[in-house]
Image (spheres, rainbow, N blue to C red):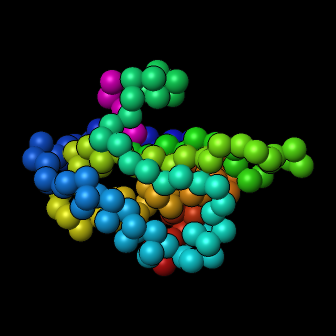
Amino acid sequence: MDDRRRPRLGYNSYMLDISDEQFDAIISQAMDELPSEYIERLNNVLVTYEDEPSPEQRKQLKLRCDESLFGLYEGIPLTRRGNGYTFVLPDKITIFKKPILHFSHDMASFKEQVKRTLWHEIAHYYGLDHDRIHELERKSQRT
C-alpha cells in the first residue's frame, strides 16, 4: 500500500536540509504523537526510512514520473492474516524523506506530513484501504 502525491502548483523548489538523524527523530516524534492504542498494537513491524523509493518499488507500484511516494507499507494487513501466519519476516513501513521535503514549505509542514504519512501507512497495516483512509482524513480535518 502506498501514499502517492501528485505534484501541484506551489511545488517547493527550495528544500529544507534534514539529516538522517533528524529525520529519524521526527519519525519517532510522530509515532509518539499518534494514538497510543494504534502504536502499541503494532506487532512485527519495522518502521524505517529511505531518501526515495527504489527503482524496483517505483516499477512495482507503476509510479509515473509525475508521481511521488511519501510512504509505503509492505506486508500482510492484519485483516488478511490467517491461522497459518507464523514465522514470517516483519512487515515494513518506509517513510521517504526527499519526496516529503519537496512538498514541504517549512519544518512544521514537513513534520505534519511525516506524521500523516506514518498514520496512513499504519492504517494499511490494520487493513484500511485508500478510500477508507481518505474518508477518515476528511473527517479529522473537519473537526
Is the magenta region chiefly helix, strand or loop?
loop
Residue 107: within the magenta? no
Q: Position of residue 25 (x, y in %)?
A: 31, 65
Taking the image as shown, residue 69 lies to the left or right of residue 17, namely right
At 33% across and 37% down in the image, what residue appears?
A: 52
At 45% across and 75% down in the image, what residue appears?
A: 32
Q: Nearer the viewer, residue 133 or 87?
A: 87
Q: Is residue 17 above or below residue 138?
A: above
Q: Position of residue 49 (x, y in %)?
A: 38, 48
Taking the image as shown, residue 4 lies to the left or right of residue 102, namely right
Q: Position of residue 103 (x, y in %)?
A: 25, 48
Tell me the quadrant of the picture where the N terminus can be found: top right
Residue 99 in view = no
**Residue 98, picture quadrant:** top left
Taking the image as shown, residue 85 lies to the left or right of residue 116, namely right
**Residue 136, picture quadrant:** bottom right
- The count of marks equals 0
Residue 69 in view = yes
Residue 68: within the magenta? yes
At 18% across and 55% down in the image, what residue appears?
A: 18
Q: Position of residue 4 (x, y in %)?
A: 43, 41
In magenta, the rendered stretch is 65-69
Q: Residue farthest to the right?
A: 83
Q: Residue farthest to the left?
A: 14
Taking the image as shown, residue 116 lies to the left or right of residue 133, namely left
At 25% across and 53% down in the image, what residue appears?
A: 20
